[in-house]
Amino acid sequence: MKRAQAAKAERDWRGAAEMYRQALELRDAFGPRVQLGHMLKEAGELEAAETEYVRALAMKPTDADLHLQMGHFYFVKGDPDESVRFYRKAVELAPGDPGLLEALRTGERRAADAPFAQSLETAMKAMAVGRWREAEAGFQILEAAGRRDYLNLHGHALKEQGRLDEAIRLYRDYASHVAKEGGAAVYEAEVQLAQALQLVGRFSEAAVRYSTARDLKMAREGWTGSVDELLEEIRNCLRRVHPSLDAGFIR
């Protein structure tokens, strides 16, 4: 086991797999069996990895973390629907676990995106090099197909073209969409919308959105950071609306 862990630390996946195999010959156990599956997956030996995961699952069929790992595995293997099935089972086994819920949301999105992989890839590559109209065309295909998870990126492409009112509409739609699911995306959506509203001079609305984002950050993390950047943005917005206001007193 020590030799397996050392090989794993060196990213010697095949060497680690061999050590885990030898350990399992001496004593079969759930943990090393799962680790063997991980090492084989990292080494690209997906069929062998699947065999080991299935064996581990037979040993502990109600282990939520193993279902999570198998969800990751089936995504790597190129089977997003099977990946979602394991994520859902993980959530059933450990309801309320935020990490599992986030994995399920991500898995469901990837499965829904699979038929549009080419359009998404084209749009993302265009975004990376600043070809905003090309990116817009790709995101329009996704939006027409009901894939609302990319409304914010579509908004970015429009914002970069100076089409701010259209971008704000998409940011607003995206914020409403992710609000139903919760999670970190809600915070990001509120910040993006606030920034866009600032750009068009709608400072009162921007302040409200920044305030919402700040509340979300406090709820998730318990504090706003050593430098409260969101509070400063709220103050800046209010100064633009009420120049005589001493915004420094706002907490």
Image (cartoon, rainbow, N blue to C red):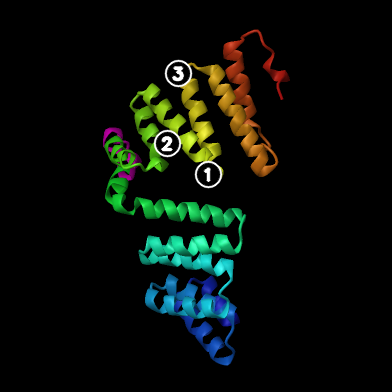
Quadrant housing the C terminus: top right
- Image location of residue 84, percent across then percent down: 44, 60
Q: Report which quarter residue 6 is drawn in.
A: bottom right
Q: Position of residue 65 (x, y in %)?
A: 57, 66
**Crowd tier of the residue under label 2, counting other residues whose Cα lies within 10 Å: few below 14, some 14–19, many 20 or above:** many
Image check: 28 left or right of 162?
right
- Magenta segment: 124-135
Which quadrant would the N terminus be assigned to in this image?
Answer: bottom right
Mark 1 or 2: in front is 1
User: Tag 1's secondary structure?
Assistant: loop
Going from N to C along the chain, the mark reached first, 2 or 3, is 2
Give the residue pinned by disc 3. 200
Q: Amino acid at mark 1?
A: Glu
Could you tell whether 208 is left or right of 16 in the image? right
Q: Which residue is at the front of the view, 243 or 137?
A: 137
Q: Secondary structure at mark 3?
A: loop
**Quick one: label 1, few (<14), some, or many (20+) residues within 10 Å?**
few
- Confirm whether residue 12 shows in the render: no
The residue at the far front in this view is 92
Q: Where's residue 147, x and y in %?
A: 37, 43
| Disc number for residue 152 | 2
- The residues tagged by marks 1 and 2 sit, at their Cα atoms, a distance apart of 15 Å
Three-letter residue code for mark 3: Val
Which dot marks residue 181? Answer: 1
